[in-house]
Amino acid sequence: MASRSDQELLLRVDVAAERLAVSRATLYRLIQRGELPAVRIGSAVRVPVSAVERWLADQIATQGGGL
């Protein structure tokens, strides 16, 4: 198993969307609404892995883990 330091820190929008099983448009909406932090590097938008993990944990906690 790779250590945290061996993993990517930032994800491209398409990769972050795939990991969350949502569309790119949905991910961009989350970023635009400020629900999911992102960084801009030049013209590229990247999403921190830690932000994806935190957002998912918040969603599970808010929804009580159920539908």
Image (cartoon, helix red, strand yellow):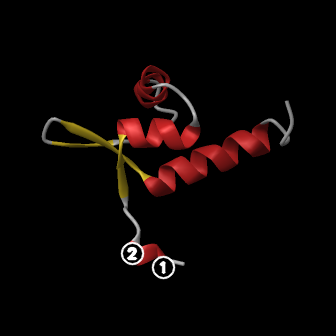
In this orientation, which residue lies closer to the viewer: 50 or 6? 6
State left or right for residue 1 relative to residue 7: right
Looking at this view, name the residue that lies furthest to the front: 1
Residue kind at label 1, given as amino acid type: Ser
Q: Quadrant of the C terminus?
A: top right
* Disc on res. 26: none
Badge 1 marks a residue whose secondary structure is loop
Residue kind at label 2, given as amino acid type: Asp
Looking at this view, name the residue that lies furthest to the left: 42
- Tell me whether circle 1 and circle 2 mark residues in contact (CB < 8 Å): yes
Measured in 3D between alpha carbons, the distance from the residue under mark 1 to the one under mark 2, in whole angstroms, is 5 Å
Q: Position of residue 63 (x, y in %)?
A: 80, 35
Q: Is residue 11 above or below residue 63?
A: below
For the point 47% across and 74% down, the residue is 4
Q: Is residue 67 above or below residue 46?
A: above
Could one spot residue 37 in this view of the protein?
no
* Disc on res. 3: 1
Q: Position of residue 20 (x, y in %)?
A: 57, 39
For the point 13% across and 41% down, the residue is 42
For the point 45% across and 42% down, the residue is 16
Answer with the quarter of the image where residue 29 lies.
top left
State left or right for residue 44 relative to residue 26: left
| Residue position marked by numbered label 2 in the rendering | 6
For the point 48% across and 79% down, the residue is 3
Q: Residues within 10 Å of mark 2 (few under 14, many from 20)?
A: few
State left or right for residue 35 relative to residue 56: left
Q: Position of residue 7 (x, y in %)?
A: 41, 68
Q: Is residue 47 above or below residue 2?
A: above
